[in-house]
Amino acid sequence: MTDHRLPPIREVVLTRPAGSNAGLQQALLETRPAGCPQPIVTIHPLLAIRPLPRGGDLPDALATMTSADLVVFVSPRAVEAARAVRPLTDWPAREFAAVGAATGRALADAGRPATFLPDSSEDSEGLLDCLREAPMSGRRVWIVRGETGRELLADTLAARGAESRFVAVYRRECLEPPAAAPAGPASLWIITAPQALDCLARLAAGTHGSESGLLDSSLLVINERARERARALGFRGPVALAGGPGVDTLARATWRLIADRADRQTATPPRH
């Protein structure tokens, strides 16, 4: 489908886990440009976050953690799951690091503000940039996360001499699909987690041959890696980049897409 034939966006689908979409929904309300069409906003979580039984790897990690260690949290969910096992103020480590501003806020709320908080980008690359001057040789780094995730932090810090260890405290699970899901290019799915793309692809498994199927839906993702992943999973519709996971960034990108589609509909079609 060529760009000038893309329909207006009539529905925006928020896909973060249950209880995590209110901020983005509010940001969409507050940043709507005057005169911009108002789509339906649907909340459709693709992932469930389940704390691991008995704290997962965390009790063993805490048993050997020392004050010289660095603890990295990859997400607010990692902070939430970890502090439920033991208050962060009681942890032996003295320095904490956060991937992204939202994780930094979660640490501050838990009483342990991040020693290292990136301001260049809200991903592993941003934190690595923030840590570039921090001594790593011989230092133990605990990376608190889900059961799976990117290896970049651990590999890069290990290359600098650190002893990187993953601490799994939760797992991600795809939710059961509803009877019907918004589909086709008029539906914009906002995807902020790579695993959510996998869940959406599973949901789309029966629509490969449909012009209005989920694989033809519009996607808004946070970075180029996610766009490449979407294409590899077979998504055929437009895949736009938001530029980051922050709710204001996502909201502004959403309204740009909605306005752009609306403008295309009113523009004079090209003559051939």
Image (cartoon, rainbow, N blue to C red):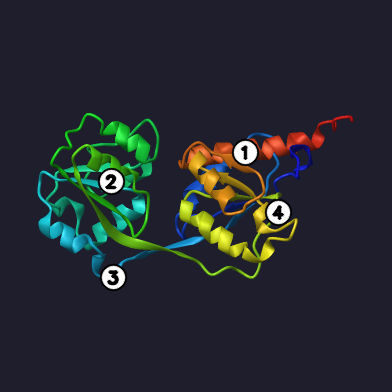
Q: Nearer the viewer, residue 93 or 31?
A: 93
Q: Is residue 264 left or right of residue 244?
A: right
Number of numbered discs visible in the structure rendering:
4
Give the residue type at disc 2: Ala
For disc 3, the marked residue is: 53
Neighbor class of circle 3 (other Cα within 10 Å; few <14, some 14-19, many 20+) is: few
Q: Which secondary structure, mark 1?
A: helix
Give the residue type at disc 3: Pro
Q: Is residue 132 left or right of residue 41?
A: left
Quarter assignment of residue 265: top right
| Among the two numbered marks 4 and 1 on one chain, the one whose residue lies closer to the N terminus | 4
Give the residue type at disc 4: Gly
Residue 188 in sight in this render: yes
For disc 2, the marked residue is: 154
Q: Is residue 39 left or right of residue 269?
A: left
| Among the two numbered marks 4 and 2 on one chain, the one whose residue lies closer to the N terminus | 2
Q: Which mark is residue 255?
A: 1
Contact (Cβ within 8 Å) of mark 4 with mark 1: no
The label nearer to you, 2 versus 3, is 2
The label nearer to you, 4 versus 1, is 4
The label nearer to you, 4 versus 2, is 2
Q: Work out whether 2 lies above or below 177.
A: above
For disc 4, the marked residue is: 184
Residue 132 coordinates in the image, percent (x, y): 26, 31
Quadrant where the image shows the N terminus: top right
